[in-house]
Amino acid sequence: MARLRAHLHWATGSTGRWLLSKIGRAFDRLAFLARVLLAGLRYRNNGRRLVGRIVVEQIYFTGVQSLELIAALAILTGVVLAWRSISVLEAVGNLQGLSEVLITAIVREGGPLLTAVVITLRSGSAVAMEVGYMNVLGEIEGLEMQGLPVAHVLCVPRLLGVGVAVVGLMVLFGILAVLGGLWASWLVLNMTPWTYFYNLSITLRPSDFLLVLVKGICFGMVIPVVCMFEGLAAQRAITQVPPRVSRALVDCLIYVVIFNILISVAFSGAR
């Protein structure tokens, strides 16, 4: 019995320490976000041309270069989801529920989540690795020696660029997925585009647009903040960078799923 109590005490103590470390890391990243935002406000008139150029480059890398992957994934998701939903709804005799399934699964839930996952794996890893190598190789220290505010020059453009790209790609994903659903509905049910979009317009609410915007802004801040934070934490050797990148990706995916659930629950309760 004493041994069992000792094991239970060790297990609960380890779980508590692990949970506290996760909470502490989340607050550290929140403080880092606040620092970046304050730097953006404080130095907003400094280096506008340089910051603007980096923002455009980040939007191009994160958004434009991801268009092909996002478009293919969105169309495939819309086609498969509509085709499978039609099969199920036909069996229960409720084809009118197709629009509700598409709006819920694509616009409200699946689209934002899949877009965030793609951006995390593609651009988040690149941001964490770039910042990590810059830190290890002394480039960030060189910026500081030149008197440049690192949080403003390095972090603010990536935060803005990734945020804008994530919101734009989420909107694009929803549009292309809906068009993919239209194609599947036309092939299987011979449904006209007018009927299809009319059913969607009845189901779609103004709050759905706000929901996508809120998720886009939230995910667009979480991904670059976590990745930059972990990149800046790699300080001693190049071998520290890959583990930091791995931790950044895992934590980004966890945060994205958690925030996706919390935002959806909040909007569902507000309706």
Image: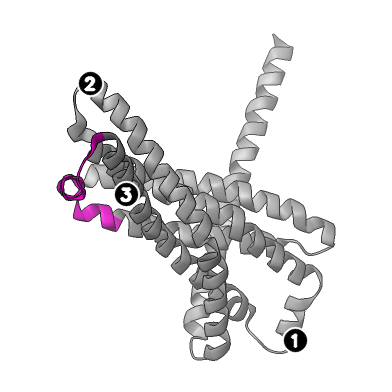
Give how far across and how far down residue 63 sits, in percent. Answer: 50, 66
Q: Which mark is residue 92?
A: 2
Q: Position of residue 37 (x, y in %)?
A: 49, 73
Q: Nearer the viewer, residue 246 or 15?
A: 246
**Picture residue at 20% right of the left edge, 56% below the top:** 206
The part of the image, by quadrant, that contains residue 62 is bottom right
Q: Total of numbered circles in the picture?
A: 3
Q: Where residue 35 sits: x, y (%)?
A: 54, 71
Check if mark 2's residue and mark 1's residue have beta carbons within 8 Å.
no
> Compared to 7, does 64 lie above or below?
below
Q: What residue does disc 1 label?
A: 145
Label 3 belongs to which residue? 178
Q: Nearer the viewer, residue 201 or 133?
A: 201
Q: Which mark is residue 86?
A: none
Mark 3 lies on a secondary structure that is helix
**Marks 2 and 1, how far apart at CA:** 69 Å
For the C terminus, give its image quadrant.
top left
> Could you tell me which quadrant the N terminus lies in?
top right
The CA span between labels 1 and 3 is: 51 Å
Q: Is residue 157 magenta?
A: no
Q: Identity of the amino acid at label 1?
A: Met
The percent position of residue 97, horizontal first and vertical second, equals 21, 34
The magenta region covers 189-210
Question: Which badge, 2 or 1, is on the more N-terminal residue?
Answer: 2
N-terminal of the pair, mark 1 or mark 3, is 1
Q: Secondary structure at mark 1?
A: helix
